[in-house]
């Protein structure tokens, strides 16, 4: 699936926004990201700002940005699963209105229908652990290996401790 910034914003708006529990307050003019901490519904422009903000977080900014992108994806899944399978045609129409793909309609339907079988409690949001040496991230092999071992059974553990300490707190 391919889209641009404008298509992404329009897609999130057409979807009715996405609920995200913003983990820290943000005030970053470069990304136009101004958020209070806490649960809120992000619409197009704010969703883009939230998922692009990295400069506020210094050397770990790319890492934090990846976490935020995962949070928006998980929020989208939660919103989809509030509906039932009969909403699939409408959801696909929204998606196809703002994206491009070379997938066949059959493949799109199969993938999208599979989303209704997912248990959000079994889906984690991880970024491969790294040491940050500007401008490069260098994987911490021992922690990255532990993360990959956790995936051996096809799912990350449901422990939410991944969020603790990621913002310097």
Image: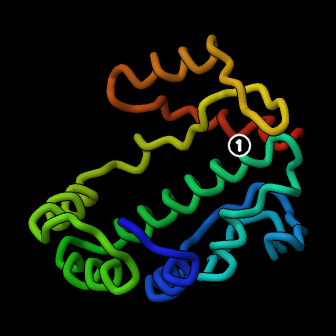
Is 165 on the left-hand or right-hand side of 127? right
Q: Left or right: 111 with respect to 164?
A: left
Q: Residue furthest top?
A: 142
Residue 113 x, y percent position in the rendering:
19, 62
Seen in the picture, residue 45 relative to 114 is either above or below; the reply is: below
Q: Is residue 75 left or right of residue 63?
A: left
For the point 19% across and 81% down, which residue is it?
89
Q: Residue at x 60, y 31 (%)?
A: 128
- Residue 106 relative to residue 94: left or right: left
Graded by Cα atoms within 10 Å as few (under 14), some (14 to 19) or many (20 or more), the crowding at tag 1 reads: many
* Corner quadrant of residue 156: top left
- Percent coordinates x, y for residue 18 in the rendering: 54, 73
Q: Looking at the image, how many numbered discs can be counted on the residues?
A: 1
Front residue of this view, candidates 2 and 24: 2
Determine whether 146 is above or below 70 in the image.
above
In percent of width and height, residue 91 lies at 30, 79
Quadrant of res 44: bottom right
Query: Which quadrant is home to the C terminus?
Result: top right
Q: Does residue 14 sit above or below 69 in this rendering?
A: below
The image quadrant of residue 146 is top right
Where is mark 1, residue-wise? 63
**Residue 154 locus on image (x, y percent):** 33, 29
Residue drawn at point x = 51 percent, y = 86 percent: 10
Which residue is more in the foreground, 135 or 14?
135
**Mark 1 falls on what kind of element?**
helix
Q: How is the image coloured?
A: rainbow
């Amino acid at each position: 699936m391919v889209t641009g910034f404008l298509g992404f914003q329009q897609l999130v708006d057409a979807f009715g926004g996405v609920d995200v529990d913003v983990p820290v307050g943000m005030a970053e003019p470069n990304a136009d990201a101004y958020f209070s901490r806490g649960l809120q519904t992000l619409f197009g422009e704010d969703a883009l700002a939230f998922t692009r903000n990295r400069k506020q977080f210094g050397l770990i900014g790319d890492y934090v940005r990846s976490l935020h992108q995962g949070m928006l994806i998980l929020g989208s899944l939660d919103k989809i699963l509030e509906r039932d399978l009969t909403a699939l045609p409408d959801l696909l129409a929204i998606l196809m209105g703002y994206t491009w793909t070379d997938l066949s309609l059959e493949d799109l339907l199969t993938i999208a229908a599979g989303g209704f079988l997912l248990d959000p409690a079994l889906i984690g949001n991880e970024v491969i652990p790294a040491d940050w040496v500007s401008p490069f991230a260098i994987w911490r092999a021992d922690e990255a290996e532990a993360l990959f071992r956790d995936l051996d059974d096809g799912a990350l553990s449901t422990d939410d401790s991944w969020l603790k300490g990621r913002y310097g707190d």
